[in-house]
């Protein structure tokens, strides 16, 4: 693989392009293997985007200190690529053009073109701008190395390395590894080879017996208790661009979170996760919130030393029923810890569990609500020395809070995404929303609401049913016709209209009745016809017609009649040909049982 020259695409004042250099590398091995489970997650997300979309590119800068010359820096770049197989990996179809699976293919040797620039002043600032420019174009995953870089000099001496990296090659943990190795490589130190690489991880994940059994059980339990969507609410006209992200820098929120964590014996990560869940539940009208946490999967020494993506999504279901925000912290902490312990699993089996739950629940499972704590070790350092019990001091600290607009995007695989930033002396926090479901301004208001909730909870009990008011948020209003069935909100008129379409525009009805467990259930009534004469056939057709919708729910029970009643109220008294739930085991359920 030979990537294009890492040269800036536009003239930049104060930055002069010098002739690019070529770095040749030869690693200890090459090879090909299936994608690791961590790579699979990133790969699926990249395929959801348009070709060339740079969303998963990582701009990065590394300082060059001391008296190292350009040649020493280029040797360090070569050693970095040689020691980490992920930096010389392409992602290609196994049997290009034959529909084969995507695999990772590690090149043992090759060339990397490195740009060289002379900065008139502020070389680190110039390198950051150059890194952003290098990262502005998506990678060709099959043909290009997942790294672009350029050396920024001042007075002929290297001062920084500007990098653009593919998230398929490195995650946040890996970036910290590279940052720690970089000055030692520049100094010419001969570092020991990594013990574990993505090729080794792929082999481990396909061992017999495979890992991940406990994590799969965690997912199945969580899916059964989670709402089928946190966004089972009326859709709205999306803004343009559709996805909006805002950020906040709040030392006060960090001090308050630390105080709450110490008081209740939990982590600050749990405090932020439960707060995010409470805000989301308050807006969407849910007393149970489901968030997918980004799990680093670095607790094992082998994966802890591997450069490459290892993170996977873990399901965290948090109860927001009766009680106060403080009451939710202990159970929420235990749920988050269980999620982080059970984040390494076979994505194909979890997808089967997902589909099996959707089949039984009667709707696609939409879990596009995420939380990602990217802080090193999940904690802050060097927070302002403010006594959280001093209301005046904490109020004064809030004067330093800053909110800001981050960006807007046309495509993101999330309806809401909460995330911390890497800052160590303040609560750097971000919220992204899908404006097809929530107004874009909700992202900013959730940030200020998060700060208000945390600060208020330090000095008083905040009932969970008052979180929206405390945080200054407006709960979504569902019009007449919407009703709660268990954890799920359902638009009954739309569900009945869907059943009528499935039945061939013939008469049909959906009613809320008492289920066998004493709770409410949906019963669908319709006239049998050829091809639609069993509950199983009806359920299959309804699930197919409801795919992708968050406002409808397949009936839990189907009643097929020989002819319609005289009026809508007469369906329960009609003669019945056959009735039942129609939930014969799906192929996904059968695979899980095996």
Image (cartoon, helix red, strand yellow):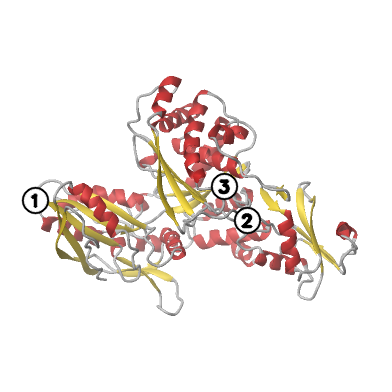
Label 3 secondary element: strand
Return the residue at label 3: 290
**How would you rate the neighbour count of disc 1 (Cα within 10 Å): few for under 14, some for 14-19, many for 20 or more?**
few
Disc on res. 550: 2
In this view, 214 is above or below 19? above
**How would you rate the neighbour count of disc 2 (Cα within 10 Å): few for under 14, some for 14-19, many for 20 or more?**
many
Disc on res. 311: none
Q: How far apart are marks 1 and 2 (CA)?
A: 60 Å
Quadrant of residue 34 within the rendered picture: bottom left
Q: Nearer the viewer, residue 344 or 354?
A: 354
Q: Position of 233 compared to 539: left or right?
A: left
Q: Position of 420 compared to 143: left or right?
A: right
Q: Nearer the viewer, residue 34 or 402?
A: 402
Residue 332 in the image: state x and y as whole percent. Answer: 54, 38
Return the residue at label 1: 155
Counting labels gives 3
Which part of the image, by quadrant, shows the N terminus? Answer: bottom left
Residue 573 in the image: state x and y as whole percent. Answer: 90, 59
Q: Which of 320 and 247 is in front in this view?
A: 247
Label 1 secondary element: loop
Q: How far apart are marks 3 and 2 (CA)?
A: 15 Å
The structure residue drawn at horizontal position 58% and vertical position 31%, both measured from the top left corner, is 327
User: Would residue 194 be visible to someone looking at this image?
Assistant: no
Does label 3 or label 2 sit earlier along the sequence?
3
Which part of the image, by quadrant, shows the C terminus? Answer: bottom right
Quadrant of residue 328 within the rendered picture: top right
């Amino acid at each position: 693989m030979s990537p294009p020259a890492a040269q800036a695409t536009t003239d930049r004042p104060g930055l002069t392009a010098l002739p690019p250099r070529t770095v040749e590398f030869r690693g200890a091995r090459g090879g090909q293997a299936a994608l690791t489970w961590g790579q699979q997650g990133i790969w699926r997300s990249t395929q959801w985007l348009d070709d060339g979309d740079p969303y998963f590119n990582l701009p990065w800068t590394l300082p060059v200190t001391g008296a190292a010359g350009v040649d020493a820096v280029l040797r360090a770049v070569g050693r970095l690529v040689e020691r980490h197989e992920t930096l010389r990996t392409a992602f290609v179809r196994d049997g290009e053009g034959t529909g084969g699976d995507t695999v990772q293919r590690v090149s043992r040797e090759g060339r990397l073109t490195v740009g060289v620039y002379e900065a008139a002043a502020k070389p680190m600032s110039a390198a950051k701008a150059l890194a952003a420019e290098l990262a502005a174009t998506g990678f060709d995953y099959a043909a290009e190395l997942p790294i672009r870089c350029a050396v920024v000099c001042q007075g002929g001496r290297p001062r920084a390395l500007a990098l653009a990296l593919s998230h398929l090659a490195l995650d946040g943990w890996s970036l910290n590894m590279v940052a720690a190795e970089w000055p030692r490589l520049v100094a010419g130190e001969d570092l020991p080879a990594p013990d574990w690489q993505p090729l080794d991880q792929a082999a481990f994940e396909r061992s017999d017996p495979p890992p991940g059994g406990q994590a799969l059980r965690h997912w199945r339990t969580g899916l059964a208790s989670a709402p089928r969507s946190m966004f089972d609410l009326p859709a709205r006209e999306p803004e343009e661009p559709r996805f909006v992200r805002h950020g906040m820098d709040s030392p006060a929120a960090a001090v308050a979170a630390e105080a709450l964590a110490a008081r209740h014996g939990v982590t600050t990560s749990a405090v932020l996760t439960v707060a995010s869940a409470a805000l989301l539940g308050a807006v969407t009208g849910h007393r149970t919130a489901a968030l997918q946490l980004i799990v680093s999967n670095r607790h094992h020494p082998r994966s802890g030393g591997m450069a490459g993506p290892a993170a996977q999504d873990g399901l965290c279901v948090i109860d927001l029923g009766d009680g106060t925000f403080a009451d939710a912290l202990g159970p929420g902490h235990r749920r988050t810890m269980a999620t982080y312990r059970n984040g390494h699993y076979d994505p194909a089996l979890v997808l089967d569990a997902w589909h099996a739950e959707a089949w039984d629940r009667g709707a696609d499972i939409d879990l596009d609500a995420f939380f990602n704590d990217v802080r090193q070790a999940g904690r802050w350092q060097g927070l302002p020395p403010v006594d959280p019990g001093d209301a005046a001091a904490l109020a004064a600290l809030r004067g330093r809070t800053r909110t800001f607009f981050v960006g807007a995007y046309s495509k993101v695989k999330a309806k809401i995404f909460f995330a911390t930033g890497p800052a160590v002396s303040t609560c750097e926090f971000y919220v992204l929303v899908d404006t097809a479901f929530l107004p874009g301004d909700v992202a900013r208001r959730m940030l200020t609401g998060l700060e208000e909730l945390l600060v208020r909870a330090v000095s008083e009990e905040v009932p969970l049913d008052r979180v929206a008011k405390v945080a200054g948020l407006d709960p979504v209003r569902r019009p007449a016709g919407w009703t709660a069935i268990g954890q799920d909100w359902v638009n009954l008129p739309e569900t009945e209209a869907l059943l009528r379409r499935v039945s061939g525009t013939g008469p049909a009805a959906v009613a809320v009745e008492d289920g066998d467990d004493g709770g409410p259930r949906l019963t669908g009534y319709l006239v049998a016809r050829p091809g639609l004469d069993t509950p199983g056939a009806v359920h299959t057709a309804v699930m197919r017609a409801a795919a992708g919708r968050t406002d409808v729910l397949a009936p839990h029970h189907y009643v097929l009649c020989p002819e319609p009643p005289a009026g809508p109220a007469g369906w329960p008294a009609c003669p019945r040909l056959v009735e039942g739930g129609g939930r014969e085991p799906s192929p996904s359920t059968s695979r899980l049982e095996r």
